[in-house]
Amino acid sequence: MSLSDELEKLQELHAAGALTDEEFETAKAALLKEDRDVIKDLGTGVGDLMKDEDTYLLCMHLTQLLGYLIPLGGLIVPIAMWVAKKDTSSAVDEHGKMIVNWIISLFLYSVVSGLLCLIVIGFIPLIILGILTVVYPIIGAIKAKEGVLWRYPLTINFL
């Protein structure tokens, strides 16, 4: 029976005199409270998951992989997540700086490797960088979920 059906039934009982005003109000309040509790239980979703700092950090690392699905998504989303919470959490600030440093380092390494492609040897570093762009965020996410700040190897510290 839905909430509206139960409220309607309560109203009918009250109108028929089977329930006093006090009993009606108590039963109505209990029904509404029960419904709010159900809604609150259903509301545990992404918003509640993101309240857990380790999960937020995990998502920051993994959003770098969005670049494979959405152009510039792997750049914009982790930086936006970092900027959104860097003032409220030192862990988010540290992980965010490390991620931004990796993104900048990756860009520089890619430019150099691209130039080296002109003399053929740049293809190998480009392949390695392609692998690292997937592996490093995954390792960083696993370590972040464990509560550890893992510094990506080969990262130049700019921030």
Image (tube, rainbow, N blue to C red):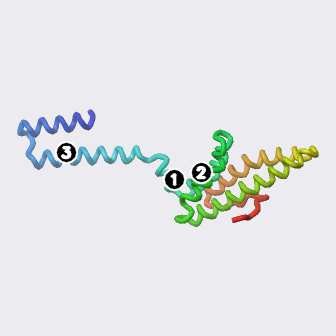
Who's the residue at 76% across and 49% down the image? 132
Ranked by sequence position, the earlier of labels 1 and 3 is 3
Q: Relative to residue 133, is residue 100 depicted above or below?
A: below
> What amino acid is labelled 1 in the image?
Met
Residue pointed to by mark 2: 59
Q: Nearer the viewer, mark 1 or mark 3?
A: 1
Closest to the observer: 108 or 99? 108
Horizontal placement of 44 versus 130: left or right? left
Q: Relative to residue 12, is residue 99 depicted above or below?
A: below
The dot on residue 13 is none
Who's the residue at 63% across and 59% down the image? 96
The C terminus lies in quadrant: bottom right
Q: Position of residue 49 (x, y in %)?
A: 50, 51
How far is disc 1 from disc 3 in space, using C-alphas? 34 Å
Residue pointed to by mark 1: 50
Q: Which residue is most to the right? A: 119
Q: Which SS class for mark 3?
A: helix
Ranked by sequence position, the earlier of labels 3 and 2 is 3
> What amino acid is labelled 2 in the image?
Cys
Horizontal placement of 34 versus 26: left or right? right
The dot on residue 28 is 3
Q: Which SS class for mark 1?
A: loop
